[in-house]
Image (cartoon, rainbow, N blue to C red):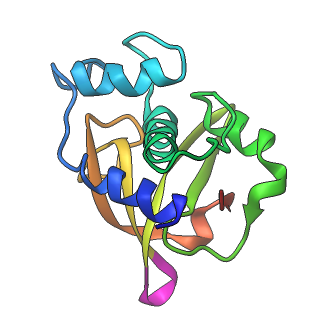
């Protein structure tokens, strides 16, 4: 099993995990994700979720975690220049840039028709917020909305 497929499997196992209480950036699972990047509760956690999933896969497969240890989406994108790709595939993670340092990320699960992606994201919800309250599967992200993708 590859690191990408294992990380995606771990991310899938977290679907429906929610903040406790909602909209708090807290709760046992969320705090576990944040702790993996050295943060306590209360921070945006989409990148921490991706990092935790890949770190967990790395431990299970006994390989080195290739990611920089950061909860910053754009910080990760900048630190992973040598891992950037423009053609997404399942297991990559996407990077969105909303300006003024605000970003969002999650895993590409599947390529869909019409330039869309099926994704698994932390700190989102069914309405698509980048400040949501759960790990969710989304099917409405467009490749054209992405700053880029990281293949690790």
Residue closest to the eye, 52 or 129 = 52
Q: Residue at x 38, y 34 (%)?
A: 131
Which quadrant of the view contains residue 45? top left
Where is residue 32 drawn, in percent x and y? 35, 23
- Indicate whether residue 84 is drawn in magenta: no
Above or below 2: residue 53: above
**Residue at the far top in the pictured view:** 40
Where is residue 19 drawn, in percent x and y? 22, 27
| Span shown in magenta | 111-116
Residue closest to the eye, 69 or 20 = 69
Where is residue 76 drawn, in percent x and y? 69, 38
**Residue at the far right in the pictured view:** 82
Q: Residue at x 52, y 65 (%)?
A: 2
Left of 19 or right of it: where is 36? Answer: right
**Residue at the far front in the pictured view:** 62
Q: Residue at x 59, y 51 (%)?
A: 96
Residue closest to the eye, 5 or 60 = 60
Above or below 16: residue 4: below
Q: Residue at x 31, y 37 (%)?
A: 132
User: The C terminus appears in which quarter of the rendering?
Assistant: bottom right
Residue closest to the eye, 53 or 43 = 53
Which quadrant of the view contains residue 102? top right
Left of 9 or right of it: where is 117? Answer: right
């Amino acid at each position: 099993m590859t690191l990408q497929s294992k990380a995606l499997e771990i991310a899938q196992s977290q679907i429906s995990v929610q903040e406790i209480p909602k909209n708090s950036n807290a709760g046992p699972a969320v705090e576990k994700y944040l702790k993996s990047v050295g943060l306590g509760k209360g921070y945006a956690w989409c990148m921490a979720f991706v990092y935790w999933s890949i770190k967990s896969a790395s431990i299970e497969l006994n390989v080195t975690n290739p990611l920089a240890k950061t909860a910053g989406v754009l910080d990760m994108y900048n630190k992973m220049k040598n891992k950037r790709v423009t053609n997404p595939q399942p297991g990559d993670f996407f990077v969105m840039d909303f300006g003024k340092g605000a970003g969002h990320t999650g895993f590409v699960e599947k390529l869909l028709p019409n330039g869309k992606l099926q994704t698994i994201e932390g700190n989102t919800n069914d309405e698509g917020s980048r400040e949501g309250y759960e790990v969710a599967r989304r099917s409405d992200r467009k490749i054209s909305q992405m700053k880029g993708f990281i293949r690790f």
